Image (cartoon, rainbow, N blue to C red):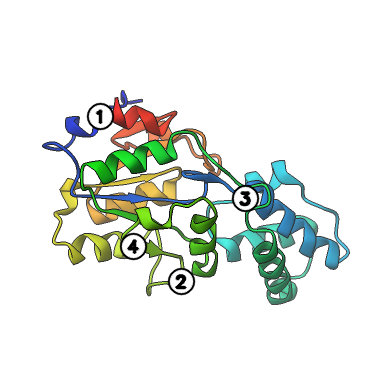
Amino acid sequence: MKTPKHFSDWFEGWPELVCLDLDGTLVDSVPDIAGAVDAFLAELGAPLAGEDRVRGWVGFGSAKLIEQALDWAGIDKTKHDEAYRAFLLHYHAHLTDKTTLYPNVKALLKALKHHNVPVALITNKPSVFVKPMLDHFELTEQFGWLLGGDTLEEKKPSALPLLHCSESIEALPENCLMIGDSITDFKAASNAGFKCALVTYGYHQGVDLAALGADAIIDDLAELLV
């Protein structure tokens, strides 16, 4: 595992762009996601998955999440569209009931703003949920871009969302940073030529983050500011 470093150890000063993942990096959204999963499972007469189980499924996008839940419950895949609709309706109604910000999110965003670093929110979450969640935590104005999983033609681990942002401000990829919590974020950064920092507290899907070769593995976003 590499020792966490301050931005200035990777860049001459501060990065030209920082891209941030949402779920598992800025917010712990699993309690509300799990509630929506259990809601559609109940509608289909299946047992409830529960928060701990859903926590291990999150990270590959909501369509994949539904697929995993149906498979676990032994429900035919033909029910996917019905389950997905029920999931989206319930989740939209309970988007931030139990979702919480991780420590030092606002401190990191404040520091980036102070140093005039452009910041992008890049998530595979459906875009309809992104702004309402950021509005709830009063973070929306901190971001120059809000990219959901359906905003562009491709989503992470594609490099497209990251390069869409860097190219729009003519930032060199090697001077940009992706901060996330999963192999999906790492692959997106690698594909785009960005530096990458991964947080240990998020949703890893059982992957050993230390083995991926990210530029830093951190327990707290504040480590980037030390």
- In this view of the protein, which residue sits in the foreground, 222 or 206? 222
Badge 3 is on which residue? Answer: 57
Whether the residues at callouts 3 and 2 have beta carbons within 8 Å, the answer is no
- Choose the circle earlier in sequence order: 1 or 3: 1
Residue at horizontal 38%, vertical 36%? 107
The kind of residue on which mark 2 rests is: Asp
Relative horizontal placement of residue 146, taking residue 97 as reference (left or right): left
In this rendering, does residue 63 appear at all?
A: yes
Is the residue 192 above or below the residue 155 in the image?
Answer: above
Q: Are marks 4 and 2 in contact (CB under 8 Å)?
A: no
Q: Secondary structure at mark 3?
A: loop
Q: Residues within 10 Å of mark 4 (few under 14, many from 20)?
A: some
Rendered image quadrant of residue 1 = top left
What count of labels does the image hold? 4
- How crowded pointer 1 is (Cα within 10 Å; few <14, some 14-19, many 20+) is rated as some
* Amino acid of disc 1: His
Q: Give the residue number, with chain letter if any, for mark 1.
A: 6
Quadrant of residue 73 within the rendered picture: bottom right
Quick one: SS at disc 1? loop
Residue under the point 66% across and 68% down = 88
The first of marks 4 and 2 along the sequence is 4
Tell me what residue is drawn at x 40 percent, y 59 percent: 156
Q: Nearer the viewer, mark 3 or mark 2?
A: 2
* Residue wearing tag 4: 145
Q: Position of residue 57 (x, y in %)?
A: 62, 50
Other-residue count near label 3 (Cα within 10 Å), few / some / many at <14 / 14–19 / ≥20: many
Q: Earlier in the sequence, mark 4 or mark 3?
A: 3
